[in-house]
Amino acid sequence: MAHDSRREDYLRMSLRFALSLDDGDPARAAREFATFGRRLARDRDSLPQSDADRAFSLVSLAADLIDYRLPFADDAQAETLVARGRDLLSEALSLDPDCHDATRMLFSLETPSAEERSRFLREGAEKVRVACESARDRLCDALDEARRPLGASVAMRPWWRWLADLAECALICGRNRESIDAAEQLLASDPHDLSDVRFTLAYALAKLEDAPGLARLAERYPTFAAPRAADDAWIQISQIALAHKSCRFADARQLTERLLATYPGSAGVLVRQAEIPDGRFARIRVPAYGEDELVVAVSEGVVLLMEGMERTGRGVLGAWVARTVSELSGEKGSEGASAS
Amino acid sequence: MNAWNELVERCARRRNEKIGPLSDEAYAELVLAVRQNPVDFADEAPEQALLVLARALDAWRASRERDDLLADKDYEAEHARRLAALRTECERAASIDPDCLDAHVTALLASELDPDPLLSGLLALERAHAKDEPPAGDAWDDVFYRPHLRLRAAVARTCLDGARYRMAAAAAESVTSVAPTDPLGARHTHMLACARLEDEDGLGVLEARWAGRESAWSHLARVLLLYKLNRLTAAQRALRGFDRLCAGGAYALLRPAYVEPYLPDRPEAAPCSFEEVVMAEREVEPLITDVPELIPWCQGHDWLVASARAFAERNDLDW
C-alpha cells in the first residue's frame, strides 16, 4: 500500500480524461483510452487537466525530489533539491490554493519543529476534510457509477495524508492519545488504510503500554482490507516493546527472533537503529518485508527505543534490542553508535 | 533513610521484647537510653549490620560536602571512590546479617547500573527476602518492615527510569496501599507514571487522594499531562503554578542538575523547596525524551525564563 504520488497523478489524469470522453460512444472511448498512457508520458499538455491536476503533478515531482532523492544527496545537492522542491510546491499553490499536499509539504519543509507542524496540521484538519469531501462529492456527481469509488478515494487522499502526518507528528511530540485519535479518524475514513496509519497507531498504543489495545489492533488487521498480515515491523516492534516493558524478557526475545525471521538479513538495521528523515508527501514507499521497510519502521520507532535513562544514550529498549539481535544473529554493531 | 532513628527504634523494640513488656513511660525511658548510646544496645546481628550501614551512609553523605571544590575529573574519581567505599561497607553489613535488606539494596543502588540490570537485581532481592503479609495498619509503623517498603519504592523509581510506566505505577501503588502515609513518596513516582501514560483519571485520583500535600512532582505531573493532552492554555497555567509554588522551579526545569543516586531512598526535602524541585526534575528527565519539545515550549514563555534568571541571580547560581 502506501501513497504513490506518480500513480495518483496518473489516476487523477485518467479520471479527468474519462470525464472528457463522450458517454454515447463506448468504442471511441476505448480507442481514446488506448492512447492515454502514451500521451500522459509524452504529451501531457494535450490531455484535459484542471489547475488542481497540474498542481498535483508538481506535488508529485516535489515528492520525488524531497522524499526519494534528498536522503541520498550530499550537502550541496541537498540545498538545490530543497530549493527546487519548494519552488515546485509554491508553483502548485499558485495554480491551486486548495492543494493541501503542497500546503502541508511546504510548511513541513519550512518548519523543523514537530510541535509547530502538529499545531498547523491540527488547526487545518477540519478545513481540509470539508474541502476534500466537497471535492469528492463534485467529482462523484460527474463520474459514472463504476469510477465513483476510485474518484472518491483520489479526492480524499490529501485529507488522509494530512491525518497520517498529524498522527505521526503527534507521536513524535509525545501526544500519544492525539496520535491514536487521528489514526482512528483516518481508519474510519479509509478502511483500506492506504496510508498504513495502523503502523503509527501501533506505536502510539505501545507508548501508552496499552496491551489490550494493541492486541485488538492486530485482530482488526483483516478488517482494514490491507492485504497484509499483522506481522509488519511496526506491530512486531510494538509487541516487543510491551513484552520488554513488562519484564517478559523471554517473550521479548522470542518476538525479536520472529521479527528477524520476517525480515531476513536485516539484523544490522536493528543493531544500528539509524534515524532517517520522514517522508514529506507521505511515509516513503518501500517493498514490504524488505530491509528498507525495517529501516523506516526502526526510524519511526525511536520514540519507543530511545526512552529511559540508559548510559549509551540509545534508550533502554534500544540497547536491549541491539544486544539481543547481536546475540541472536551474530551481527556486530559499533557500540554506542546511537541514533542521535 | 534515617538509619540512626531506625536503629534506635529497633534496639528499643528488641530490648522490650527481651525484658518487657514495659509500660509506656518505661519504654520512653528505654528509647532515650538507646538514643544516648545506640552502639551499646546493638547486640544482635541485624542491629549490628544496621549500625555499619548507618555509619557508612553518614560517611557517604559527609564526603559529598566537599564536592563543590572539585574539578569535573576529580569529582568523577571521588564519586566513584565513595560509591565503592559505600558498597564495601554494605557488603560488610550483609556479612554480619545476610538478611540486612537495606544493605543489599543500597549496595545495588550504589552500583550505578542501567535500569534493566538494576531492576532485575532489585526484583531478585524481593524474591529472596519475600515476606508473607505486610503488617496490619500502616506498614511504615513497623520499623522491621520498612526495608521492604524502601525496596518496593526503589523498584517503582527504577521502572520509571527504565520506561516501564505501568509497572512503575503498580509498584508505587503497592507501597502506598500498605503504607498510606507514604513517607517514601512513592506517590510521586506514581503521579509521573500517570502523566507519562496520559492517564488523566489516574492522576486525578492521586491528586484528590493527596490533596493539600502538593509537591514539585504533583505540579510537574500536571504540566506534563496537560501538555501531552494538548491542552496548552491549561498546561501554561499549571506551569505558572509550578513556578510560583516551587522554589526555583523554572530554574531547575531549564537548568537540570546532576542528582546523586538515592541511597537507599529519596533524601527528605521540604515540600516544594528547591531541593525537592531539583530531585523531581531529575525524576522527570526520562519522561522528557517522550516530549522532546516540552522544554523548548517552556522556554518560549518569557516570564518563565525571567523567573529562572531572577532565581539564579538571587542565589548566585550560573545562568
Image (cartoon, rainbow, N blue to C red):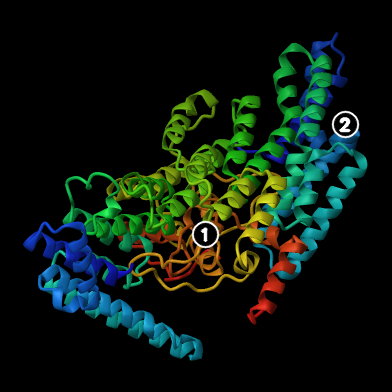
Give the left or right position of residue B86, taking residue A305 as reference.
left
Q: Which residue is painted at 73% across and 49% down in the image?
A: A117
* Relative image position of residue B133 (x, y in whole percent): 19, 45
Q: How many marks?
A: 2
Q: Residue furthest top?
A: A24
Contact (Cβ within 8 Å) of mark 1 with mark 2 = no
Q: Kindly identify which residue carries mark 1.
A: B284
Helix, strand or loop status at disc 1? helix
The answer for how far apart the CA atoms under marks 1 and 2 are is 60 Å
Q: Which residue is painted at 27% across and 50% down in the image?
A: B139
Helix, strand or loop status at disc 2? loop
Q: Which residue is painted at 52% across and 69% down in the image?
A: B275
Please state the chain letter of the residue tagged with numbered disc 1 in the rendered image: B
Q: Kindly identify which residue carries mark 2.
A: A47
Query: Label 1: how many residues lie within 10 Å, few (<14), some (14-19) or many (20+)?
Result: many
- Residue type at mark 1 is Val
